[in-house]
Image (cartoon, rainbow, N blue to C red):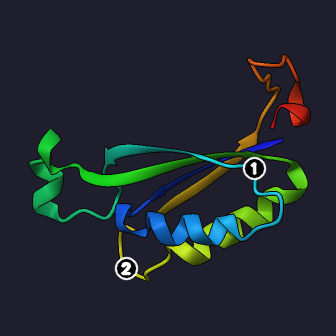
Amino acid sequence: MKIITAMIQPFMLNKVTSALKTLVDFPGMTVTEARGFGRRRSVQEQHSLHLDEFKNKTRLEIVAPDEQAQQIVETLVRAARTGNSGDGKVFVWSVESATRIQTGEQNEAAL
């Protein structure tokens, strides 16, 4: 299993969600609001960064079977890309285990 975490522009959420829903057996996702900054900041911003200057982002988290992860990443990147600075990032790493609280199902059965 893999967990895919993406930080995207908030206004791209509907487009990304629509694209991901077209995938066969898409496992679902969790969406949260986030704030942060990356390396591409002006010199002035680098010297005077304050909490209220953080950029709004939307964080997506998707846990998927290994064989589906790459397709999800490609779809997500294609849908979220505007070509402008600040489009976001996608991270993928392994999930050691998963348990569905309601039923006790574990690992891929819990997805």
Which residue is rendered at x = 62% and y = 47% of the image?
A: 29
The amino acid type of the residue labelled 2 equals Asn
Q: Where is residue 41 in the image (x, y as percent from the top left)?
A: 24, 62
The local secondary structure at tag 2 comes to: loop
Badge 2, how many Cα within 10 Å: few under 14, some, many 20+?
few
The amino acid type of the residue labelled 1 equals Pro
Q: How far apart are marks 1 and 2 (CA)?
A: 29 Å
Which residue is rendered at x = 51% and y = 59% of the image?
A: 89
Between marks 1 and 2 in the image, the one whose residue lies nearer the viewer: 1
- Quadrant where the C terminus is found in the figure: top right
Residue placed under numbered mark 1 in the picture: 27
Q: Which residue lies furthest to the front in this view?
A: 102
Q: Where is residue 90 in the image (x, y as percent from the top left)?
A: 58, 57
Q: Which of 52 and 23 is in front in this view?
A: 23
Residue placed under numbered mark 2 in the picture: 84
Q: Position of residue 50 (x, y in %)?
A: 12, 42
Q: Is residue 40 visible?
A: yes
Q: Which of 48 and 33 is in front in this view?
A: 33
Which of the 4 image quarters holds residue 63? top right
Which residue is rendered at x = 28% and y = 53% of the image?
A: 56
